[in-house]
Image (cartoon, grey):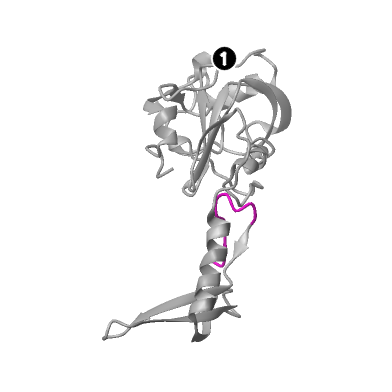
Amino acid sequence: MSDVSIGRTGHDVSLSSALLLYTGENGAHYATVHGIAADRVTGRPIIGAGRPLDRRALVDTLVQLEKSAAPKCEFLPANLLGVSSAAVTWWCPPAPRRVFFNCKELGKRSRVVAHPGLLFQASLTGFRVFALKESGRPTPDTPLFEPPYFNTWDLGQICIGSAQVPRRIEVDAIGGWEDGFFNSAFTHPNHGGKRVTYKGGFYAFWRDMLDGKFEAFPLDVLVPMKGATAGKLVAGAIGGKA
């Protein structure tokens, strides 16, 4: 694809040129620079004709890349748990938030309901959410629970669908990722393991939540994830490299 997201750049970037390196039989090295065009049918990037790359131009290019790649100094929010070039992990304390449902079984409904503490991770391998029974800031040993939500797969994977989420995996995009999750309608339970332990099942649980049965989130409905901890998530041991 021609559009990519790179952590900590602060903006989206598009493929604009390519450097090709050559090595001769005598050990000599050469380089050419090529412009990028888009295929008229597929839109895929195509490497165009090249021209020799001289030493001065190469040095200037490397200097600019080094400036862009260097991490920028910034204040870290208190809810941040881990950040790398591949993932950002943060938590949300228990709080009331509005949810939206649009499915045959529950109809089109919306209500502000209580939520448990939540652990989010936006990474190159996807967007994930996990539930917490503890109300304080997680530690590496804090156990994770299945997210009690529709539109989630196993291992906390969120089915993004048509949700509007940031294209950047950065600390300052955390709010956008949360908005993408909470402002989208829950439409269906995904296949996989059990998400809640509740008499009547998943639909009954959310019907009661939407009817205002619980003032606080009922933590006893949460399903533990065997061996899963906040520390393992930050370290990339759940769902892929972080």
In the figure, 111 relative to 6: above or below? Answer: above
Q: Residue 89: image x %, image y %?
A: 52, 36
Name the one closer to the observer, 189 or 35. Answer: 35
Q: Residue 32: image x %, image y %?
A: 47, 82
Q: Residue 183: image x %, image y %?
A: 69, 38
Chief secondary structure of the magenta portion? loop
In the figure, 28 relative to 42: above or below? Answer: below
Q: Which residue corresponds to the image point at 56% horizontal and 38% vertical from the top-left?
A: 151
Residue 238 appears anywhere in the view: yes
Q: Is residue 2 magenta?
A: yes
State the residue position of label 1: 218
Q: Give the range drawn in magenta.
A: 1-11
Q: Element under label 1?
A: loop
How packed is label 1: few (under 14 Cα within 10 Å), some, or many (20 or more)?
Answer: few
Q: What amino acid is labelled 1 in the image?
A: Pro
Q: Is residue 176 magenta?
A: no
Q: Which residue corresponds to the image point at 44% horizontal and 28% vertical from the top-left?
A: 230
In the figure, 46 relative to 174: above or below? Answer: below
Q: Where the C terminus falls, by quadrant?
A: top left
96 relative position to 92: left or right:
right
